[in-house]
Image (cartoon, rainbow, N blue to C red):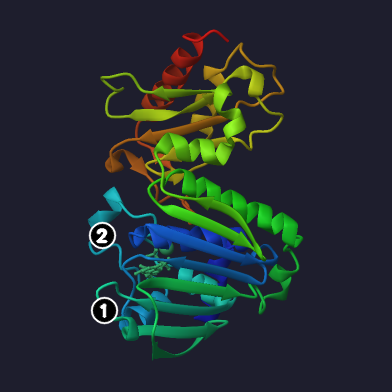
Amino acid sequence: PVLVNQIAAGEVIERPASVVKELIENSLDAGATRIEVTLEQGGTQLIRVHDDGHGMTGDSLTLALTPHATSKITESEDLESIGTLGFRGEALASIASVARVRITSRPAEQPDADATTIRSEGGSESPPQPCAAPGGTTIEIRDLFFNVPARRKFLRTPGTEYGHCHDAFVRTAMAHPHVHWTLHHNTRTALDLPAASREDRCLAILGNDLAEGLLTFDSPAPPHGDVSVWGLAGMPDIARPTARQQYVYVNGRPVRDRNLGHAIREAYRGLLANDRHPVVIVMVDLPADKVDVNVHPTKAEVRFHEPSAVHGAVLSTIRQRLLGTDL
Ligand code: ADP
Ligand code: MG
């Protein structure tokens, strides 16, 4: 089973940033309001995620490392309307097969002394031990790919890996403004984002110096069918040479979607030079049964049941906001 998990890990866990993404999504699914991420050497040495979520009992801690033992889907029809970020039950088992893992957790309602800790090294677990810990969960991942030299070799410099971790962190933090997020790298606190409004969180991440160049948009009432679109559109004069400052979400998940990318480009048609990319944040929300998130293991891709309706809603909302402004 370790080998099977290592193969699964190849699909989901490419580098430290993939681990960061999976762990913080688990913290969100656990209802955390405080999430603290600590990295050493760009996450190649250590990735620690601490949350104040609902925690796990000793039994569920062992299960958490078992492949496909998700606690999040009980009925097969749930797949049609997934409300949690995770649902495959693959991430922790995959990570554990290619790293050294320690998980300490305590359900919020149990006393401090009733926490449990478990260790696993390259997929082989040692039995859970009782310990004392604050309510919530702390997961430490050390030496990613220590037992898969071919993958370890493909890790880039700590600086580059850190850049990817930072990106995964802010892309998720942006969509969850009610959570207080902190990111530490080596001995430095890189980001501290206390709970904020949706707009203030976006500005805190994009940088307040850009605030004057950003227009808030919101799909007009009544919304397009049941698609709603909210975000910030950068004025043409703050456009960038790359698309890195584009953040696109569907139902709170960061996604890469050609259809939405095209809608954004069309919204700026005639307003930008060909080699420029707008700074833009787009959050699309629609009923869970109108979008398929189960098409790719990392869930970065989605499939809309009515892609043209979503395309139209994004294009027209942003376009109208831009054209209604003196550019
Ligand atoms: P999935 O998120 O798809 O269910 P994972 O492998 O990411 O699968 O996690 C396995 C299980 O471990 C989850 O279903 C959940 O029950 C538990 N778990 C993982 N991380 C946390 C956490 N931070 N807080 C509480 N429970 C967690
Ligand atoms: Mg998960």
Q: Earlier in the sequence, mark 2 or mark 1?
A: 2
Q: Residues within 10 Å of mark 2 (few under 14, many from 20)?
A: few
Q: In this orientation, does residue 300 appear?
A: no
Q: Is ligand 1 within 8 Å of the beta carbon of the residue shown at mark 2? A: no
Number of numbered discs visible in the structure rendering: 2
Q: Which residue is mark 2?
A: 76
Q: Secondary structure at mark 2?
A: helix
Q: In this orientation, does residue 180 appear?
A: yes
Q: Residues within 10 Å of mark 1 (few under 14, many from 20)?
A: few
Q: Residue 142 in the image: state x and y as whole percent.
A: 61, 75
Left or right, 105 with respect to 245, comes to: left
Type of amino acid at the residue the image marks with label 2: Ser
Q: Residue 266 in the image: state x and y as whole percent.
A: 54, 19
Q: Which residue is mark 1?
A: 110
Picture quarter with the C terminus? top right
Type of amino acid at the residue the image marks with label 1: Gln
Q: Secondary structure at mark 1?
A: loop
